[in-house]
Image: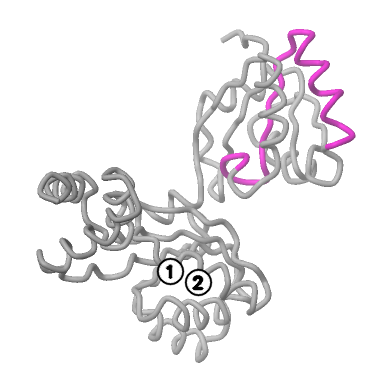
Amino acid sequence: MSLKPGLYVTATPIGNLKDMTFRAVEVLQQATLILCEDKRVTAKLCQAYDIQTPLSAYHDHNGEMVRPKILERLRNDQAIAIVSDAGTPLISDPGYKLVRAARDEGLSVFTVPGPCAAIAGLSVAGAPTDRFMFAGFLPAKTHARRKVLTDLSSVHATLVFYETGPRLIEALQDIEAVLGERNVAVARELTKLHEELRSDTVQELVTYYENAGPPRGEIVLIVTPPEKENWTEDQLAQMLTDLLAENSVKDAARMAAEKTGMARKTLYDMALDLKKHD
């Protein structure tokens, strides 16, 4: 395989080294340079797969200084890979500014897909997957964390967060306080030796971890969406009538769908019918 010039956004294992794809190995072996968060972490991966490509640190602290040099190399038709310490780059990791800058200049950007902790956790949690929202790490402080959760409280979708062991209990307590009694899955150390997934009501999980102590390792939190209310036809008609007073049929249907969790098309048809008979 001969690499075309461009930036290769390359996923790496989140724990088990055997999850490295054949294509990812080839890309890292043939690239001119590998950009990484921590050279010590990526060096272990390179050693495991006989990858001898030079490594260069690229992270939030040096991005502004290093980015122009990387873009210059891309302009000179080099193939450069970017990786994170684990998983898919740019998912709660630095790198999006480089991708955006490269694309703004018309430079090629390729994806080399692979492991992602958020998707891995979601796939085994047993939570609805038809609609989900990844919200990264919750804030460390209670006030800020509750504000974020309040902003997400009306989202009718499965919520996916990253969290740390020492903050897990407080995060679960705030989820219960703000979002109410939801089912939550705690996916810990995915693909690693001590992989664990514990799923229960948030209250039961708080009790469990208060007794067992905070878990170690990296954690994905999966929070199920709120239960859908049983809206009567009269209630829906009244809601849509109120919304139509100040909004278009399209916007009224969208806002009603966000509030009820119902299909937007169904509500659009109802709103259109109400508008015709107004």
- Give residue 264's position: percent from left, percent from top: 24, 48
- Give residue 102's position: percent from left, percent from top: 70, 22
Is residue 92 in the magenta section?
no
When asked about the image quadrant of residue 167, the answer is bottom right
Residue drawn at point x = 39 percent, y = 65 percent = 154
Residue type highlighted by circle 2: Thr
Is residue 84 in the magenta section?
yes
Residue type highlighted by circle 1: Ser
When asked about the image quadrant of residue 187, the answer is bottom left
1 and 2 marks in contact (CB < 8 Å): yes
Find disc 2 in the rendering and name its residue.
150
**Label 1 crowding class (10 Å Cα cut-off): few <14, some 14-19, many 20+?**
some
Decide if residue 181 is on the left or right side of residue 253. right
Find disc 1 in the rendering and name its residue.
153
Residue drawn at point x = 75 percent, y = 15 percent = 74
In the rendered image, the quadrant that contains the N terminus is top right
Please name whichever residue, 40 or 86, is drawn nearer the observer in this view of the structure: 86
- Give residue 160's position: percent from left, percent from top: 46, 59
When asked about the image quadrant of residue 184, the answer is bottom left
